[in-house]
Amino acid sequence: TMTQAVSKNPDLVDKVKGVFQFNLKTKDGQTVVYTADLKNKPGQVKQGTIDGVKPDCTLTVADEDYFDISSGKTNAQQA
């Protein structure tokens, strides 16, 4: 998972230097939000937003497409 990757690789914060918000749209029309703070040490991933942290990049995508992209099943540029 993304949370495990961040905790196992604390140097990601020094490399990425950004905050990403993922708005995942479900089939039933709900939006589930995840925030990946790879800007502020030690880095964190949280469902929802992180108080006091503004995203540098917001991605809105269908949850199925996101999982296909993250698993390598689909190319992000083609989704």
Image (cartoon, rainbow, N blue to C red):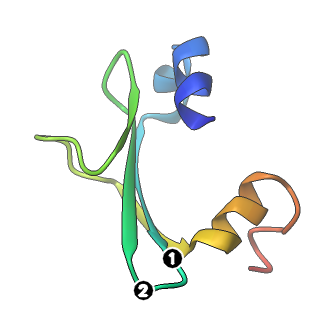
Asked whether the beta carbons under mark 1 and mark 2 sit within 8 Å of each other, the answer is yes
Image quadrant in which you'd find residue 61: bottom right
Image quarter hosting the C terminus: bottom right
Q: Amino acid at mark 2?
A: Gly
Tell me the tag on residue 26: 1
Image quadrant in which you'd find residue 11: top right
Residue at 37%, 15% (x, y): give it: 42
Residue 9 vs 38, above or below: the answer is above
Please tell me how crowded label 1 is: few (under 14), some (14-19), or many (20+) other residues with Cα within 10 Å: few
Residue at 52%, 30% (x, y): give it: 3
| In the foreground, 63 or 16 | 63
The location of residue 50, given as percent across then percent down, is: 22, 42
The location of residue 32, given as percent across then percent down, is: 39, 64
| In the foreground, 47 or 41 | 47
Image quadrant in which you'd find residue 75: bottom right
Q: Amino acid at mark 1?
A: Thr
The location of residue 7, given as percent across then percent down, is: 52, 16
What is the C-alpha distance between the residues marked 1 and 2?
5 Å
The location of residue 29, given as percent across then percent down, is: 42, 86
As drawn, is 36 to the left or to the right of 66?
left
Residue located beneath label 2 in the image: 29
As drawn, is 55 to the left or to the right of 30?
left
Image quarter hosting the N terminus: top right
For numbered disc 1, what is the local secondary structure? loop
For numbered disc 2, what is the local secondary structure? loop
Tell me the tag on residue 53: none
Residue at 40%, 51% (x, y): give it: 34
Residue 10 vs 35, above or below: the answer is above
